[in-house]
Image (cartoon, rainbow, N blue to C red):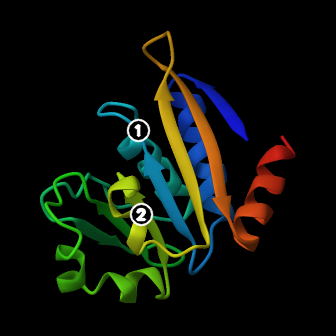
Amino acid sequence: MEIRLNGLEETKEFGIRLGNLLRKGDILCLNGDLGAGKTTLTKSIGLGLGVYDYITSPTFALINEYTGKIPVYHFDVYRLENVEELYDLGFDEYFYGKGVCIIEWAEKIERLLPKERIVLDIEKGKDIDERRINITGSGNRYTEITKELEKN
């Protein structure tokens, strides 16, 4: 499924809509070049999940936790030097925990990710504010979410 967004307002609306669909145990993987809009999208997904704290990229901390309707675990593994560093964080407690995981640069930790997940590959468009999001994934939640997103 491909979504085209023009401008920050459409990105925010899409993110809030997606956030409203997410529930405990969902794994959302965000991939894309630097500046593609992963953190911007995460902020609006957070709004849909009821997070009103300021969401920032956890580039140096690897993970930030937020409180919303359910816990939100925001990973940024861009600077991860080796995948084993995630074992020290107890990543599996997050992946199989009571919240939603949003993982920026998820392709770097592909082998650790649960099979059931939703993947958003974000590309910049021709215009500075245009984005194309290709949504793929596997499992029941991926199927349910894409069906809901296709309704509009």
Q: From what the image shows, is residue 93 above or below residue 140?
A: below
Left or right of residue 78: residue 135: right
Give me the disc on residue 32: 1
Residue 8: x, y in percent? Answer: 49, 28
Residue 74: x, y in percent? Answer: 35, 64
Q: Which residue was labeled with disc 2? A: 110
Residue 144: x, y in percent? Answer: 79, 64
Instruction: Give the residue at the far right of this rendering.
Output: 151
Say which of 146 and 22 sits in front. 146
Left or right of residue 118: residue 114: left
Residue 2: x, y in percent? Answer: 69, 35
- Where the C terminus falls, by quadrant? top right
Say which of 23 and 133 sits in front. 133
Secondary structure found at label 2? helix
Q: Quadrant of residue 18?
A: bottom right
Mark 2 residue crowding within 10 angstroms, few (<14) / some (14–19) / many (20+) = few
Say which of 78 and 108 sits in front. 108
Q: Say which label, 1 or 2, has the lower sequence index.
A: 1
Measured Cα–Cα span from mark 1 to mark 2: 14 Å
Give me the disc on residue 107: none
Kind of residue indicated by mark 2: Glu
> Residue at (56%, 80%) from the top-left corner?
25
> Residue at (77%, 49%) from the top-left corner?
149
Instruction: Give the residue at the far front of this rendering.
Output: 111
Secondary structure found at label 1? loop
Mark 1 residue crowding within 10 angstroms, few (<14) / some (14–19) / many (20+) = some
Q: From what the image shows, is residue 126 above or below residue 120?
A: above
- Residue 84 makes an appearance in the image: yes
